[in-house]
Image: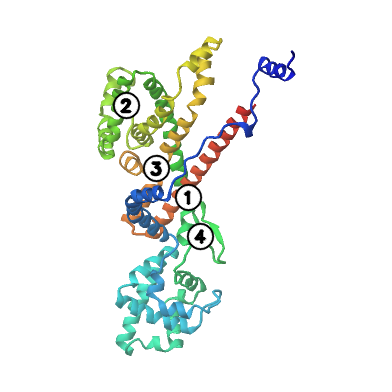
Amino acid sequence: MSNPSGAQEMGTVIDGPERPPVAARPRVARKTRSRGDVGGALLLIAPLALFMLVFFIVPIASLLTRAAWDPAVAVAFPATARALATWDGVSVPPAAAFSALAGDIVAADDAGTLGDATERLNRDVPGMRLLLMRTRRHLDQLAESAGPVAAARDAGAAKADLVQLDTRWGEAQTWQAIGRAVQPLTGVYLLRAVDSHLDANGSVAMLPPDQRVFLPILGRTFGISAVVTALVVVFGFPLTYWLSRLPVARQRLVLMAVLIPFWTSILVRIAAWMVVLPREGVINRLALAMHIVNTPLDLIYNRTGVVISMVHILIPFMVLPLHAVMRGIPPSYQRAAVSLGSHPFSAFWRVYAPLTAPGVAAGSLLVFVSALGYYIAPALLGGAGDQMLSYYIAYFTNTSINWGLAAALSALLLIATALLFVVYRMLMAGRRHMFREAATL
């Protein structure tokens, strides 16, 4: 007796199994976390989060705020700030501003805040420090000859006396600089970090070409970091490929050899390169003994020494993430491609290498970001034209004591690094989307 439904079912089986609809597919039950589990996890990470907040995030945020917040002049010249609050900012201010400034200069000198204010103003307009200190000495002479700062009590006399002392007090540009500086919120440092300034009209303009410093330094920083990253990939990829093909026991020994320099102090490693790289060092002696070169090579106090030391220091940052990826790629993939007629190099390049792209990208990003902030290697092994942006951040922090510009340069480097990370995430997202589309074909 015929069974149409059975024949239909048999035909379905013979034709091949059909893919069940999405609704009919079994669903994997998701584990839901209870509030207790979430609370326990938060308690476990709370000490680390508190430590990071107090000793990492707060100090960095405090430093970065100095790039746009400088109250030194506002603290030293409060009466001048009030007198200039209604000033149009174009012409010379009224006589009351002169009287207020004379009184503020004397009071700030007595309070010990005049030095910070003169330093701040001198960064905007060179010569302001000398002008203010000269004015302070002149006010002392007036106080000795005419009583306690009589000019400060008489606005008209104060204006005439200051203009007679120095004609710059009668120029609007001098007062415009003071008017900008008495505002604690300032963009002077951020503009200077990108080689810009405010012109006489208050508009943002680039500095003359001979005064542009920090953008070329930022370009040099990115250039050195890119060269170092490329060399780390060139040397780290074959090393990691060879490492991933070793037996497990030998992998551990080789990883230990790779990580030993990683555990050594950076200062010690750079000091070792200072012994190896000079004209009388080990490398030049071997090269001369083997007749590879006729004269010693200049490998130190230049870009070459900086790149060599940074590549040596940053190799583990490439090997570790790349090894984690290569270890998960089965060797059978290449053997299968070769067995199907592919050349071994073609099998490696078209099958194996694309699978290592996430490890190469992660290692390159880690190396590049680490190289951007290097300070010791360029400072000890490089020349004057090899210093990176971090060197100048340290200079303005420790030597010049210009915290505002140091914070602005730090913000510039941080923003550049963040933009680089955003580009990396976009590229990785595009790559994953491309693979998903290819898998659905």
**Pick the front one: 221 or 428:** 428
Q: Earlier in the sequence, mark 1 or mark 4?
A: 4
Residue 24 as seen in the image, left or right of residue 407:
right
Mark 3 neighbour density, 10 Å: few (under 14) some (14–19) many (20 or more): few
The circle on residue 44 is none
The residue carrying mark 2 is 255
The residue carrying mark 3 is 385
User: In the rendered image, is residue 127 in sight?
Assistant: no
At x 50%, y 74%, the residue is 171
Instruction: Give the amino acid at mark 4.
Output: His
Relative to 88, residue 429 above or below: above
Q: Secondary structure at mark 4?
A: strand
The circle on residue 415 is 1
At x 34%, y 44%, the residue is 375
Kindly report the distance in space between the C-alpha atoms of the residues bearing marks 1 and 4.
20 Å
Kindly report the distance in space between the C-alpha atoms of the residues bearing marks 2 and 4.
51 Å
Residue 141 as seen in the image, left or right of residue 123:
left
Kindly report the distance in space between the C-alpha atoms of the residues bearing marks 3 and 4.
24 Å
Q: Earlier in the sequence, mark 2 or mark 1?
A: 2
**Pick the front one: 75 or 420:** 420
Instruction: Give the amino acid at mark 3.
Output: Gly
Residue 220 locus on image (x, y percent): 45, 42
Instruction: Give the amino acid at mark 2.
Output: Leu
Q: Secondary structure at mark 1?
A: helix
The circle on residue 197 is 4
